Amino acid sequence: MGCFASRPTDSGGNRRKPTSIGDVSVYVPGLRIPKPVEFSQSLGDQLPKTLVERLTALRTRIVVMANQEGPTITRTRRKTQHGGSTLADLHQALEDYLPVLLGLTKDGSQLQFKVQFNWINQEDEEEETAMSNVWYEILSVLHLMAMLQMSQANLLLLPRGSTDVHHPKVSEENRRASIDIFLKAAGYLDCAVKHVLPQFSAEQRRSLPVDLAEGALRALCLQALGQGVDIQLGIAIDSSKATLAVKRRLSCEMVKYWQQAQDNLMNLPLANGWGEKHMLFVKWKHVEAKAAAYYYHGLILDEGNTEKSHGMAVAALQAADECFKESKKASEAFNSSSPTSRTPPLFGTMKYLSEKIPKETSSKVRINRDLYSYEKIMETAPTLPDFALALKPDEYQLPSVDASWSEDRTKNTSNHITGNQR
């Protein structure tokens, strides 16, 4: 398998990093951009001309769209000339390409090693990576499909103006739609880890850019699930039917998703701004989730009738307050790192908790310290309950090989036999 990585960004390559990515509810660590491929040079004498031309046309469409939209797609809601979404159009182009591309893997065909595919990285130190392996192309396509979904979720979760101009909101419709999008993105990434990465040998995996490393893919999958639970918690907070126990469970699950995402990124050599910013985003969301979990755990403990439970409640609420303050600093560190970004107006979970945590903590601490001696109040936060993770990725399967492969290969074989008989 051929592989190379070209010069880093600072020597003047193809990688383009914006100075700012605007408002961020959902972090997308840049979009990997495909570079042109000459299918005819590698496959011209191996496949029918119509099939080569179709592969070329489908991929060229993706190259053109990704290069036009890649630098701006994380921060604007751009439309096509027909009024459609550029995100949706590029995603559809990738879906159209994948079944035809998968034909190169048919029956263990050696064609899968004939074409060199080249993509511009975002989180890797090396600017671009090329491999003569169709599974690298499939992995890159799934990654890009997931990032487009995450970009779409970000747009849905940016508060818009409402009748109350001072309090822009995210509609419940957008919030519910974003959960479906997060699960779809997680499904692409889960498929990449479970069904595409196993096609690479251990040595080949080491040649993959960090953007496509197993840890990076798993972290992005967990991020999508964690943000999905965050939205579920926000909806639960707005619902009069949701109990404290439900809210505590959701917030504790959210902590686990973000903790696992952080663990997966921990030992990866993330670089080029996007990577460092990715780590800061996960750290921010992890400590933010802990603030929510300790808050609801504290409220439930405070319902107990013993000095011990009240002392544990105060300790949990103090931990919530500390985590909330830490999350503000983590948010500032994330936004100030390059490329810079902004936190949109708060909504959902954090809007509610930003008002409740400081007030509730101060009140409970004062009441309980009046009732009990200082020694009865725990100095360290109680352990959070451990709940099984309920939110799972959508089950995504690679599509069947496009029918054109059977048709064209049959025609090609027939022509080849006829030629030999002559």
Image (cartoon, rainbow, N blue to C red):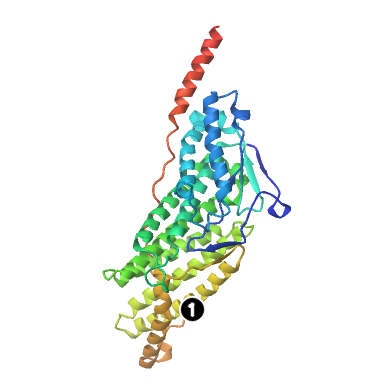
- What residue is shown with label 1? 322
Q: Which of these two is toward me, 167 or 150? A: 167
Three-letter code for the amino acid on which mark 1 is drawn: Glu
Question: Which corner quadrant holds the N terminus?
Answer: top right
Question: Which corner quadrant holds the C terminus?
Answer: top right
User: Which image quadrant for residue 117?
Assistant: top right
Residue 61, visible in the rendered structure: yes
Residue furthest out toward the left: 241
Residue furthest out toward the front: 81
User: Which image quadrant for residue 133?
Assistant: top right
Q: Dot 1 surroundings within 10 Å: few (below 14), some, or many (20 or more)?
A: some
Q: Position of residue 147 (x, y in %)?
A: 50, 52
Report the side of 387 relative to 108 (left or right).
Answer: left
Q: Position of residue 135 (x, y in %)?
A: 54, 39
Residue beneath the point at 34% across and 60% down: 173
Query: The residue tagged with tag 1: helix, strand or loop?
Result: helix
